[in-house]
Amino acid sequence: MQARIYRIVVVAVALLLALAILPAPRTAAAELKIGAILPISGYLAAVGQGQKVAMDMAVEEINAAGGVNGKKIQVMVVDDSGKIEESITAAKRVIDRDKVLMIWGPFTSGQSESTFPVANRAGVPIVSSSSAKPGVAAANRPWAFRNSVTTDKRYRDIVQLWVKRFNIKRVVILFDSQEPVMKATAEQDFPMLVKNAGAQVVDSITHGTKDVDHSAQITRLKSVKPDGVMVSAVHGGAALIAKEMVKQGLGKLPVMGGIAHDSRWVELAGSAAEGAWTTNGFWTDSPDANMQKFLKAFKERSKGGFAPNAEIAALYDTVHISAKIMKEQAITGEPAKLQEEREKIRRGWEAVKEYPGVTGLTTMTPSGDTFKTTEMLVVREGRFQRIPQ
């Protein structure tokens, strides 16, 4: 009896040992992990929080429709406060700790210049939906992408029309020297575009992002007596510039530039915004069905708390484009396939062509930037309207 019990125990122990050394069954990932680096706090909080609303909206739409290949998207969100050092730390965290398939963000061109290399070295696709300084994605190929139009392409046609329409010969450029994309636009893109249009830049005048008094800049502008003014500034500073121009009697001077690409600038500038020209793929009065559907859903979701703009809508498009790519590439999210599937997503982004999004038809270029259809707009009666051609 004791011998029989002994044999049973020996067999049981042997079975347990055999099971212990067998390879563990490979479990499929329950979710597809994506990193998102957004300025939810800090000086860009208004647009960063708006981006999160649009991102969450898109993710919920995708997950509610069955997800991607039966898997739901899970977003690992990190608030970088719009700071370069924090966006770098965020990228390392979601890559090393969270093992994400790809990253959405960061917001500014300055952040992208420093954060894209982190993802590029790690072999992780990263897509900014707002960076617009020329060359930032191209310097970090093949893993960096931008679902935004660079400023040199965005303003090319409208500068030609603006110069011709107002018979402009002499141009003064006013710009924010502390914001990287505004500075690059003013120093690199605008002078080249003005020259190509047959005019010349006679002066460049700078201000700081947090400046509240622009009287000295406008006094200098007035003394130069230009035919037109190009402004490259964030919405708060641009609104103060527009108001100071009116105050000093320059309200009728033709104005064009990066000051009017979202409704916040128009709201802050008030009547001083009237007549300003700009161009963008995001136009809230567009009759496009995709645009109106997005605006309705965004307003309901945000409870009217955020003004939708191009950067917010572009992230919404980025989420849907990413989901489409992951579906087409049969992404599983399995840990053992992580690097292989990152590579598949990268190839998918390279092949994006004429995606019909809220921000226009989107096509990826070899430089890692997108080309989109855009609208030429002018502020009339407190809102953007198409410029008559």
Image: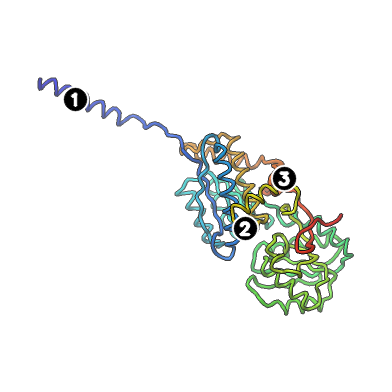
Q: Residues within 10 Å of mark 1 (few under 14, many from 20)?
A: few
Residue 320 placement (x, y as % from top left): 62, 43
Q: Earlier in the sequence, mark 3 or mark 2?
A: 3
From the viewer's perspective, tell me whether residue 26 is left or right of residue 229: left
The three-letter code of the residue at mark 3 reads: Ala
Closest to the observer: 320 or 103? 320
Q: Is residue 361 above or below residue 152?
A: above
Task: Indicate the quadrant where residue 386 lies.
Answer: bottom right
Residue 138 visible here: no
Which residue is drawn at the image coordinates 83% and 62% (left, top)? 195
Residue 224 visible here: yes
| Residue sticking out furthest to the left | 2
The residue labelled by disc 3 is 289
Residue 284 placement (x, y as % from top left): 72, 54
The residue labelled by disc 2 is 304
Closest to the observer: 146 or 237? 237
Residue 203 placement (x, y as % from top left): 78, 72
Determine contact: label 1, label 2, CB under 8 Å: no
Which residue is drawn at the image coordinates 64% and 70% (left, top)? 209
Task: Indicate the quadrant where residue 216 lies.
Answer: bottom right
The residue labelled by disc 1 is 10
The three-letter code of the residue at mark 1 reads: Val
Real-space Cα separation, disc 1 to disc 2, in angstroms: 71 Å
